[in-house]
Amino acid sequence: MALVAGVDSSTQSCKVVIRDAESGGLVRQGSAAHPPGTEVHPEEWWSALRRAVEQAGGLDDVSALSVAGQQHGMICLDDRGEVIRPALLWNDTRSAGAAADLVTDLGDGDREEGARRWASETGTVPVASLTAAKLRWLADHEPGNAARIAAVALPHDWLTWRLSGSVGAETLVTDRSDASGTGYFQAAADTYRYDLLALALRRDEAEARRIVLPRVLGPGERAGTGDPDAGLSHLVLGPGSGDNAGAALGLGLRTGQVFLSLGTSGVVAAVSEVPAADPSGLVAGFADATGAHLPLACTLNAARVLDAAARVLGIGLDELGELALRAEAGAGGLVHVPHLEGERTPNLPDATGSLHGMTLSSMTRENLARAAVEGMLCLMAEAMEAVRAQGVGVERITLVGGAARSEAVRRIAPAVLGVPVDVPEPGEYVADGAARQAAWVLSGEETPPRWETGRSRTYTAPHAPEVLDRYREAAAREAAAHGA
Ligand SMILES: Nc1ncnc2c1ncn2[C@@H]1O[C@H](COP(=O)(O)OP(=O)(O)O)[C@@H](O)[C@H]1O
Ligand SMILES: O=C(CO)[C@@H](O)[C@H](O)COP(=O)(O)O
């Protein structure tokens, strides 16, 4: 029985699953926490990966491994392959101004024209999360560091490279799903755009072409083998992927199917045969891990909205869910607009969260808990509408991510979203997608192995559009206050 490993190096933790390559059956797993914050040294991820692998029983009997990782994080390497500064993560909003500048610059001073060009040329209009915006921030705020850049990698590229034991940056590899989140990759044509890398770094294109970008491997293509010095030469490495593409692969989603992930980020994404190009910037035109596309709307706020509410109420997440289910739909008029970390969809990087409709009768613990769950889900309902506006039919949605473990979220989601919600058994679907890719690479076949996916339970509830209507009113007031 050949074993394969899948790694999910995501924002809050690193998870490793080890599965049977043929059946996909789970054999063992491990996890390790990542440090908090939006600026993290990649060595921290490497150390968490090693701890998670150890907890999962090691890799001695594992034949292949792939890494899926949080998207967009900027890792700059110097000419010796050393990390120049801690990585700036997808949820670090200091690059918001840089993103706005990139849009205007490509439009020669015209923001709308710039947004149209970014969307048509790369599929995505830059926001603070994109790697290109982080590079522009670096060029403007840390020119000494920017001048030392010899290579730029993403978290999953760098971890795959570390596992291979390579030292030279020229051996870095990536896949099209993660490359498509950089801002300097054209997913529709599978090619890097050095002109846009140059724009980001304020260099000319010839200089930008001297920067090493990870070679983009095809889906299912071998990335090499593990580090012989670490006893990993038996390990075949897969190209890996961005974490959202990993989730789609782990769930075995087919064209037209849509998932909602409630982790640190909130994500609504669909597998699509056609690339997206949304000039409003709400939907990113990313690629998936199978050769198709993954139009995606991503929020900065999701599961941690519930963490924050539980903290304020001095209770655990289970109790928060029980309280929320005891309140009526609409939380007695209390509306929580949960822009706790600023927001990306809609693009309000400087926003803060707010609570509306506070009265003596609405201010109960039950309503506060309910408003947190409803607020998070309304934010996701808006993301779902943005994906729909790109022509994706959303008739039902598959719910995953840490907050999918909450019974309250599962039961309230169909009422707020207005579609049935399929909840697969709790699991690590990003890591599973990476494991499935590893099995694919090991098999050398044209398509990923058919793995049995666990049973889903479908949640339905009468649609309660008034919850979203009231949220929209409150969110519009907030957006106006933040100059949108
Ligand atoms: N039972 C639960 N109810 C609500 N939220 C939960 C529950 N279990 C875990 N979470 C939340 O899930 C989040 C982590 O989700 P995860 O998908 O692993 O995040 P990421 O992939 O971004 O690191 C945490 O914020 C945690 O509070
Ligand atoms: O920025 C995005 C997608 O564009 C995020 O989805 C990151 O990829 C982080 O994911 P999680 O750690 O929340 O899973």
Image: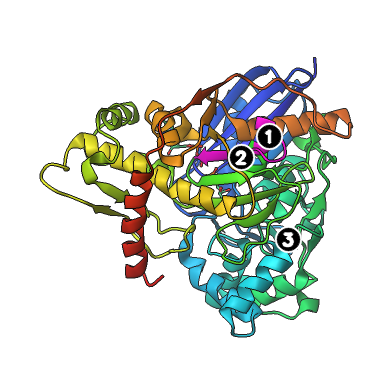
Residue drawn at x 61%, y 72% is: 115
Q: Which residues are magenta?
A: 248-262
Residue most toward the top? 1
Tell me where residue 112 sits by quadrant.
bottom right
Amino acid type indicated by mark 1: Leu
Q: Name the disc covering residue 164, or none.
A: none
Amino acid type indicated by mark 2: Val
Using a 10 Å C-alpha cutoff, classify the residue at mark 1 as few (fewer than 14 neighbours), some (14 to 19) or many (20 or more).
some
Q: Position of residue 257 (x, y in %)?
A: 65, 38
Can residue 148 be seen at all in this image of the molecule? no
Mark 1: which secondary structure? loop
Label 3 or label 1, whichever comes before in sequence order: 3
Left or right of 344, for residue 58: right
Quadrant field for ligand 1: top left
Mark 2: which secondary structure? strand
Residue at label 1? 253
Residue drawn at x 57%, y 61% is: 85
Quick one: 304 or 169, which is closer to the camera?
A: 304
Residue at label 3? 80
Quick one: 76 or 189, which is closer to the camera?
A: 189
Tell me where residue 455 sits by quadrant.
top right
Of circles 3 and 1, the one toward us is 1
- Marks 3 and 1 sit apart, C-alpha to C-alpha, by 41 Å
Q: Is residue 24 magenta?
A: no
Using a 10 Å C-alpha cutoff, classify the residue at mark 3 as few (fewer than 14 neighbours), some (14 to 19) or many (20 or more).
few
Q: Position of residue 75 (x, y in %)?
A: 63, 57
Label 3 or label 2, whichever comes before in sequence order: 3
Mark 3: which secondary structure? loop
Residue at label 2? 258
Q: Position of residue 93 (x, y in %)?
A: 47, 62
